[in-house]
Amino acid sequence: MIRFKFLIFLSVLIVLVTTSCKTSMKNISIDKNNFYPSLQRAFSTAQSGDTIVLPRGIYTIRQGLLVSDKNDLTILGNGCTIKMADKVGLENKNALLKIKNCTNLSIFDLTLDGNRENRPKAEVFCHALILLNIKGAKLKDISVKNSVVDGVYISTYNPENENQISRDIELTNVNVTNSYRNAMSIIYGYNILVSGGSYSDSNGIAPEAGIDVEANKTFDHPSSKNIVIEGVELSNNNGWGILVSSKGRPHHIQLYNNIVDDCGGGIKHTTIESVIKGNHISYCNRGMDVFRYHGRPIDNNQIINNNISNCGTGLKYIGFGGLIEGNTITDCKEYGIELRGNSEMETKVSAIENTVKNIEGKGIYSRHCSYATISDNKIITTSEEGMILMNGEQIVKNNILKENLISIYSVGSNSIIEGNTISDYGKVAIRMKDSGRGLARGKISKNKIAEIESKSKLDVRSKNVIIDK
């Protein structure tokens, strides 16, 4: 009898748990004469745990849709397109899809079309897809096109309150094209993963970036942190492919294995404690700029195994604690790698095991750096200096330099030049001289320099340089 009662109790418990965990699947009915009320009613009446299934089709609306204050809601787009009608203005209510104050939201397989060609355009709060005050979201297989401002916009109503910043957002295979400003703007966001997809053809008004991480205001806490952008394609943007601004002091912005092609610039990164690894940048006016601005803390950024080709400039670094390792920079015009000191702070950087090849200007250009270690690099075929060291302190060891006009040129610097292999130089292998800002100092030691008829191995114009053959 006791066992029978227990079995009844267990059966009732299972029913209760099953009922409480059950979610509602809603296949909504669309009024073909007026799409907006049907769509908005489905979003407004959805309950916690519901799944809304949109029927396949193209739905033209004259007012933006709103999803607000929902938990555990799933929207299955089923390949449908939601498009803004012709001549719809730029009021806030006309953002194509605004999502705010939601937790654990999921959206799949949906296209949003802002109809840019037939609407006004301006830098206002009327983006295609807006995420505000979000705590957990998954967006997958989403297409956003023809936006009258930004394609995707991630932010918050209360940026001064760190707890209100949108967070825990995954964007997988999101494709954004032909936006008037940026394909995607991350204004305030924590713990964001952008994986796969493409962000292209931003044109109209600056910044015109593929992905722009940039706050509107600066507070005591970071505007954005713990953001990973990986495996994304960024092409044909008038501005940078990826732009990480220093405004708002973001940090831990990691960039892995992205492809940037034919943009105004490849990657501009001005934050701290970040890794930029395995990215491919080609045919951009500037390849990669990594900066630490005045008054900012030590950055410790790592720039590893990137490939930059056919750009106006290669890789430019201004910072302290940076590691530039294993990068390949080819067929650029002005320089391969520039290590540039900050006029107000010491600059420390290590550039090791990089390959710089076919540069119309300089191979590696170090200027005004307090401490630069340049070792085990290959610098092959430059029209000007293979390596120029200007007004700083450098250790230059075990590099291979071939087919450079002047292989190593140290001006007004304290340079230790040791163990390098130099061949096929055009004028001279190593030149050291004083500058108006400082005396040439240091040591030339144990380098392997090929003999070339009528060319000089060494041209040292300072009494403060030790030569140890």
Image (spheres, rainbow, N blue to C red):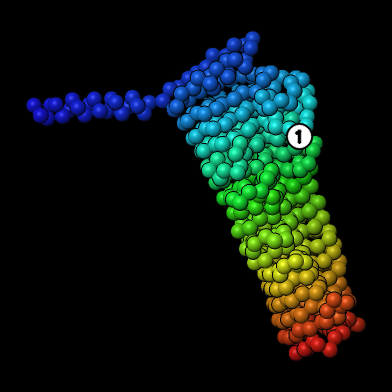
Q: Quadrant of the C terminus?
A: bottom right
Nearer-the-camera pick, 450 or 444: 444
Q: Quadrant of residue 317?
A: bottom right
- The percent coordinates of residue 369 (x first, y second) are 74, 71
Left or right: where does residue 287 sit relative to residue 68? right
Residue 163 in view, yes or no: yes
- The percent coordinates of residue 139 (x first, y second) are 56, 35
- The percent coordinates of residue 406 (x first, y second) are 85, 74
Q: Residue at x 18, y 25 (%)?
A: 8
Q: Quadrant of residue 287?
A: bottom right
Q: Residue at x 77, y 89 (%)?
A: 466
Query: Label 1 belongs to which residue?
Result: 123
Outermost residue to the left: 1
Q: In terms of secondary structure, where does tag 1 sit? A: loop
Q: Is residue 22 above or below residue 210?
A: above
Nearer-the-camera pick, 54 or 205: 205
Q: Residue at x 55, y 40 (%)?
A: 164
Crowd class of label 1 (few under 14; some 14 to 19; many from 20; radius 10 Å): some
Residue 55 in view, yes or no: no
Going by the numbered disc 1, the residue's amino acid type is Glu
Outermost residue to the top: 33
Q: Is residue 63 above or below residue 393?
A: above
Q: Quadrant of the N terminus?
A: top left
